[in-house]
């Protein structure tokens, strides 16, 4: 097992679709048997 540290922020968590992609990525790492540490920084405002 590995310890995976990942930081997400800005445009990667700007809206729900992108946030779900990040979540699915994290889940896949966990299902592969890794310990996952996630840091989420500021969300970018989506002006759409």
Image (tube, rainbow, N blue to C red):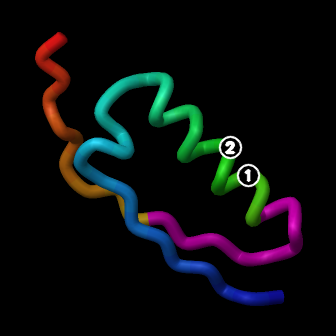
Residue 35 is marked as none
SS label for mark 1:
helix
Provide residue 30's location: percent of width, then percent of height: 78, 63
The residue to which callout 2 is attached is 24
- Place residue 28 in its image quadrant: bottom right
Provide residue 36's location: percent of width, then percent of height: 64, 71
Image height of 42 relative to 32, above or below: above
Left of 24 or right of it: where is 1? right
In the image, residue 46 lies in the stretch drawn in magenta: no
Q: Quarter of the image for the C terminus: give it.
A: top left
Residue 27 is marked as 1
The magenta stretch is 30-38
Q: Residue at x 47, y 35 (%)?
A: 19
Are dots 1 and 2 in contact, CB under 8 Å? Answer: yes
Provide residue 29's location: percent of width, then percent of height: 75, 65
SS label for mark 2:
helix
């Amino acid at each position: 097992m590995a310890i995976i540290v990942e930081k997400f922020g800005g445009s990667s968590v700007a809206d729900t679709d992108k946030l779900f992609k990040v979540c699915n990525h994290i889940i896949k790492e966990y299902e592969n048997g890794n310990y996952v540490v996630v840091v989420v920084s500021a969300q970018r405002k989506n002006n759409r």
